[in-house]
Amino acid sequence: KAGVTQTPRYLIKTRGQQVTLSCSPISGHRSVSWYQQTPGQGLQFLFEYFSETQRNKGNFPGRFSGRQFSNSRSEMNVSTLELGDSALYLCASSQQGVNYGYTFGSGTRLTVV
Amino acid sequence: DAKTTQPPSMDCAEGRAANLPCNHSTISGNEYVYWYRQIHSQGPQYIIHGLKNNETNEMASLIITEDRKSSTLILPHATLRDTAVYYCIVRVGNQAGTALIFGKGTTLSVSS
């Protein structure tokens, strides 16, 4: 069974640019969440999608956005990149319900220069 | 903010049991306790979760106190590959939306 796939693995962008990250969940998983991990703030929840609808959102500025497609694949977009956006971005998928664990991907390492 | 408190670091000898404590004194009746671990620069790996009863799987055991205000993750025979950051998480939310609120976790160092 394939795991959660995130692309690309590494990315270098310049301040002011925008970036789109992709996540393919485990087959059958309809819930997809995104997390940001930095050395200073640790793992922080960005947002969660289920059936193409955003169900929950963390405390991040509007520059961070996402969407989910009908096949459950998800993308997140960060516009007007700042140096502080450099982080490991993790995607996780799950079956519906709180009694199911999330499976995380290996992440996309974004560096903003 | 995270609803859990964990010691920042612990050491364990290879082959011995590693017991990682977690306090979650404000947990609600329908909130699950989840444990994840993260090896450097990889995505967090699910270990185990529970609501009220003790749970065991091929990786670990989870002991939850009767009042549910604390729990302990037990790795019965720690190996060097168990060196990682371990996160205890209370899963917040309901069917309409859920989120994992990570704290700083416990860095477990297993040595030979």
Image (cartoon, coloured by chain):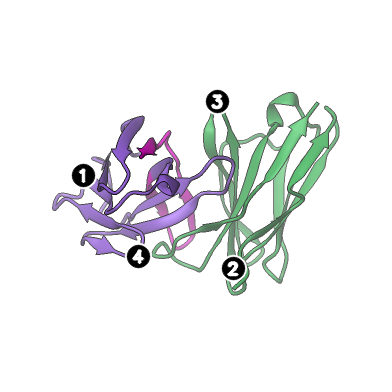
Q: Mark 2 points at which residue?
A: A30
Residue A63 appears in the picture as rendered = no
Amino acid on which disc 2 is placed: Arg
Q: Which color was chain B given?
A: purple
Residue B69 appears in the picture as rendered = yes
Q: Name the residue under label 3.
A: A40
Look at 33% across and 56% down and name the residue there. Answer: B32
Circle 1 or circle 3, nearest the eye: 3
Residue B96 inside the magenta-drawn segment: yes
Q: Is the magenta stretch mostly helix, strand or loop?
A: strand
Q: Is mark 1 on a helix, strand or loop?
A: loop
Look at 40% across and 43% down and name the residue there. Answer: B87
Residue A100, label in figure = none
Amino acid on which disc 1 is placed: Lys
Q: What element carries label 3?
A: loop
Q: Is mark 2 on a helix, strand or loop?
A: loop
Quarter holding the N terminus of chain B is top left
Q: Name the residue under label 4.
A: B58
Give the mark nearer the N terminus: 2 vs 3: 2
Amino acid on which disc 3 is placed: Gly
